[in-house]
Amino acid sequence: QVQLVESGGGLAQPGGSLRLSCIASASIASFYSMGWYRQGPGKQRELVARVISGGTTDYADSVKGRFTISRDNARNTVSLQMNSLKPEDTAVYYCSAKPLPSMATYWGQGTQVTVSS
């Protein structure tokens, strides 16, 4: 079992920045992927960004050029730098970890991000 703990959510103004961090309770060095998902009010959970072992990154079209995901295997962390925030980025953001493609995904408890003036 892997526990994931997120931090860094909060309130930001449109155009502002926030940085989310997630620390895992186990080594993530061999994990297939680490990522961030979000679920806005009345919406389904969606992929925001993920980094696959080997360094390949994958971003939702809506965040390309604004968000950057980074993975630190030595510290068992994955971070999401969010710039140029928009009100539509408002959501609960969840950290995810997938040890193998065939295995279930582990989820954090979620952290609220609100973008509003």
Image (cartoon, grey):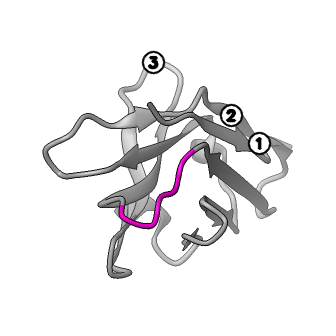
Q: Earlier in the sequence, mark 3 or mark 2?
A: 3
Specify the principal SS of the magenta part: loop
For the N terminus, the quadrant is: top left
Q: CA distance from mark 2 to mark 1?
A: 5 Å
> Over which residues does the magenta segment extend?
26-30
- Residue hosting label 2: 111
Q: CA distance from mark 1 to mark 3?
A: 19 Å
Q: Residue at x 67, y 66 (%)?
A: 75
Q: Position of residue 50 (x, y in %)?
A: 40, 61
Residue density around tag 2, few if under 14, some if 14–19, many if 20 or more, within 10 Å = many
Q: Position of residue 25 (x, y in %)?
A: 60, 43
Q: Earlier in the sequence, mark 1 or mark 3?
A: 1
Q: Earlier in the sequence, mark 2 or mark 1?
A: 1
Q: Residue at x 36, y 59 (%)?
A: 31
Q: In the rendered image of this protein, does residue 88 appear above or below residue 92?
A: below
Q: In the rendered image of this protein, does residue 57 appear above or below residue 103?
A: below
Q: Residue at x 67, y 63 (%)?
A: 82
The amino acid type of the residue labelled 2 equals Thr
- Residue hosting label 3: 42
- Residue hosting label 1: 9
Name the residue at the top extreme: 42
Q: Secondary structure at mark 2?
A: strand
What label does residue 36 carry, if any?
none
The amino acid type of the residue labelled 3 equals Gly
- Evaluate if marks 2 and 1 touch, with contact meaning CB atoms under 8 Å apart: yes
The amino acid type of the residue labelled 1 equals Gly
Q: Quadrant of residue 16?
A: bottom right
Residue density around tag 1, few if under 14, some if 14–19, many if 20 or more, within 10 Å = some
- Residue 29 shown in magenta: yes
Foreground of the two, 52 or 16: 52
